Amino acid sequence: MTAPDRDKLLVVEDDDGLCRQYRWAFPGRTVLTANSRAEAMEVLERERPAVAVIDLGLPPDPDGVTEGFATLHDLLAICPDMKVIVATGNGAKRNAIHAIGHGAHDFYEKPVDIDVLRLIVERAFRLFDLEAENRALGAIAGSSPIKSVITAADSMLKICRDIEKLAQTDVPVLLLGDSGTGKEVLARALHDLSPRAGGPFIAINCGAIPEHLLESELFGHERGAFTGAVRQTLGRVELAQKGTLFLDEIGDLPMSLQVKLLRFLQEHVIERVGGRKSIPVDARIVSATNQNLEQRVETQQFRMDLFYRLNIVSVRIPPLRERPGDAVLLGRYFLARFARESGRRVIGLSEEAVAALAAHPWPGNIRELENRIRRGAIMAEGRFVEPADLELAPADAAVIDLRTARQRAEREAIHIAIAHSQGSIATAARRLGVSRPTLYALIESLGIADLVKAGYSNDQSEPITESEAQ
């Protein structure tokens, strides 16, 4: 089924004079007309308009509403995403409300006030555009090399490819990045993509456990090792046998335990607290920190030999503010998830919310974004989350006009599609549901031709066909 055309308006009206008036009222739209339900179905199959205006009083029942309701039903059956606006006579609001209950987007009363109708129709187009963009970006969201990582930023896409390569080795990996950037997600991806995926993934935060308990947590203890040790307990290292041990905030590991961890990395054996037996353990080590470990080595707060054992390969994860487009992409992903979990009928982010997400510096990174979106999903009063629901200031003091908002959304969608298409304009065009010539024209008109010049386009071997050029 072809996607609806965002600029086409279908008018189902048996009054030819009114049809001419509608054409005059919407000069920037392609206005298609039909005098009956049968004609409307023919136009719909051929043209796929995004918005329709229908008179409920259509022949053969011009004084009733049966044919109008049948037309509404048939339109939405073929194109459920279409926004349908119904026209009713004076004092017939009951029929309009009934129509909205059956899927109509809005209504207006005859005689027609063109200014009011224009406002209703343009609002319907705006809603259609927002929903389409949310669906398109949501579909692109899951297409990074690692399914658990939602990104469109080139830097993160490269990191995902590096993680895929590193997963096939068994070397220790050190993940570097600010708090909330997704270090544990990448650590788990390293495990899930590795030959150890069938084994356990054991995580421990070295900075969250008091020093006097951390040794026992990591290496376990024998019965009677200390007061309260009534039975033998395995530590996190042992529990990670044949799997992966993730040491988060490794920079906070006390010096006394750094020696024991170094021995494990060198000899692959541990001793439980209160025990003397060397226990062999086969586990891969992945560690993470938001600190400068080299600086801590210089100040003798971290062992140099342990640092070099852990830092055979390091991966630096950029903060969210350095990942173009990701705040909006992740925001839409979280919103869809939270709305589904809570049963809220929130469709997506408003244009102003999108702009606010893109402008915010995100000091708390993805964790802050997730919390703000969760709040927005709960607090939203309409079908779209607004900046106030997220406790964010609007990006601009001035009102964002529709043209600017659409251009911003188009730039974002094109950037994401090209990034996920490895530079292929043809593939990006297919993702976006447009032809290559249309995509090239959009790139030029939006002033982002540098994407192609920078090497994104590798379609020289795929000439534009005659049918595409038309």
Image: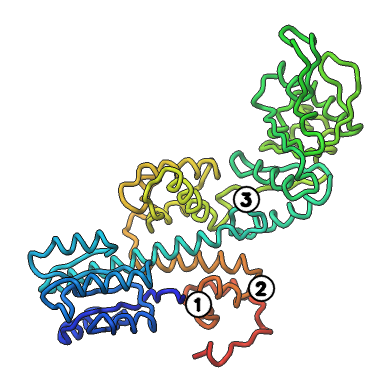
The local crowd at label 2, few if under 14, some if 14 to 19, many if 20 or more residues have their Cα within 10 Å, is few
- What is the three-letter code of the residue carrying label 2? Gly
Q: Up-down: is 437 above or below 275?
A: below
Question: Which residue corresponds to mark 2?
Answer: 455
Q: Position of residue 30 (x, y in %)?
A: 32, 82
Q: Position of residue 4 (x, y in %)?
A: 40, 74
Question: Which residue corresponds to mark 3?
Answer: 148
Residue visible at 34% across and 78% down in the picture: 8
Comes first in the chain, label 3 or label 2: 3
Residue visible at 67% across and 58% down in the picture: 145
Give left or right: position of 142 versus 273: left
The local crowd at label 3, few if under 14, some if 14 to 19, many if 20 or more residues have their Cα within 10 Å, is few
Q: Position of residue 220 (x, y in %)?
A: 78, 21
Nearer the observer: mark 3 or 2; the answer is 3
- Using the image, tell me which numbered label, if any, was put on residue 434: 1
The local crowd at label 1, few if under 14, some if 14 to 19, many if 20 or more residues have their Cα within 10 Å, is few
Q: Up-down: is 201 above or below 422?
A: above
- What is the three-letter code of the residue carrying label 3? Ser
Q: Position of residue 386 (x, y in %)?
A: 36, 50
Query: Who is closer to the viewer here, 140 or 61?
Result: 61
- Residue 228's image quarter? top right
